[in-house]
Image (cartoon, rainbow, N blue to C red):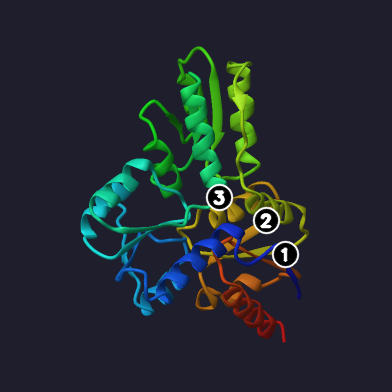
Amino acid sequence: MQIIKLNPQGYCGGVKRALKLINDALNDPSVKKPIWMLGNIIHNKNVINELIGKGVKCVDSKEKSRYEMLDEIDEGTVVFSAHGISPRVVEKAKAKGLNIIDATCPNVYIVHKNIISHLNDGYTILYIGTPSHPEAEAVLDLDNRIIFISSIDQIDSLTVSGKIYVTNQTTLSSYDIKDYFRKIIKKYPNAIIDDKICQATTLRQKAVIEQKADLCIVVGDKSSSNSQKLKTVCEKNANIKSYIIEDVSELKTEWFNNVNIVSITSGASTPDEITDKVIKKIELLNL
């Protein structure tokens, strides 16, 4: 059985930056403690558990917004995740007297900046994203006039006029998003389309599409949008069976029956050491 390691792998730039910020804060005696993550700083349970082991605290809830979760933090330093945060949450944290570390990915920050700029210029904003994802939550909290699109069928029922600006969550499928854009342009030919799928997401998905394998293993957290999209792109666009696993313990021997070529890819918040362990385990299966 041939094993192919697809590239790129490992942390993307935004994840590296976020983790550096929080680790630097941990090691800086001048930073007010305790240090809190407002929601998981990145979507990877193994990394989050490691940070908690170092003394970082975390408040996270699927039922509450970032604004609501902030009620549980009364002292120390709050770290806003790589997925972005709205000014409303920032102001609340300041009002509570908390020290703030903003680990927002620069790519996400550009999305916020462009949306606010176009709102100020009188545009209707159409934002394509995943329901309940923290990146989408932060964008929608910027302004209640933003129209959220989470299903391509919603475009049929849109009734907007005037200037239209269309953008998206950075971790969606770079292939599916084109279908959204085509449909919007067909309905609103003068709409401005601003594709903001980040390069790390695009390159990984491109590698998955261009591969030749019988099976693809995606190493990534199941709550990670970019990891889930790698699996989706692999099965939908490359027509290759795929499994997403969080670590080596989830590998199943029977997946590799009658497999001649297996490829390995990873999400943008997956540490190299976890992917390397998966590859070594598959190599042992191949002996």
N-terminal label among 1 and 2:
1
Image marks 1 and 2: residues in contact by CB distance under 8 Å: yes
Horizontal and vertical percent position of residue 66: 32, 50
Which quarter of the picture shows residue 273?
bottom right
- Dot 2 corresponds to which residue? 204
Which quarter of the picture shows residue 17?
bottom right
Residue at 55 percent of width and 50 percent of height = 106
Q: For the residue labelled by badge 2, is the local secondary structure a helix, a strand or a loop? A: helix
Q: Residues within 10 Å of mark 2 (few under 14, many from 20)?
A: many
Check the image and report above or below for 204 versus 10: above
Horizontal and vertical percent position of residue 59: 29, 61
Residue at 60 percent of width and 40 percent of height = 196
Residue at 46 percent of width and 51 percent of height = 83
N-terminal label among 3 and 2:
3
Residue 171 shows up from this direction: no
The amino acid sitting under disc 3 is Pro
Check the image and report above or below for 87 versus 37: above
Horizontal and vertical percent position of residue 132: 38, 46
- Dot 3 corresponds to which residue? 106
- Dot 1 corresponds to which residue? 6
Closer-to-camera residue (142/261): 142
The amino acid sitting under disc 1 is Leu
Q: For the residue labelled by badge 3, is the local secondary structure a helix, a strand or a loop? A: helix
The amino acid sitting under disc 2 is Arg
Instruction: Select label 3 or label 2 by which is in front.
Output: 3
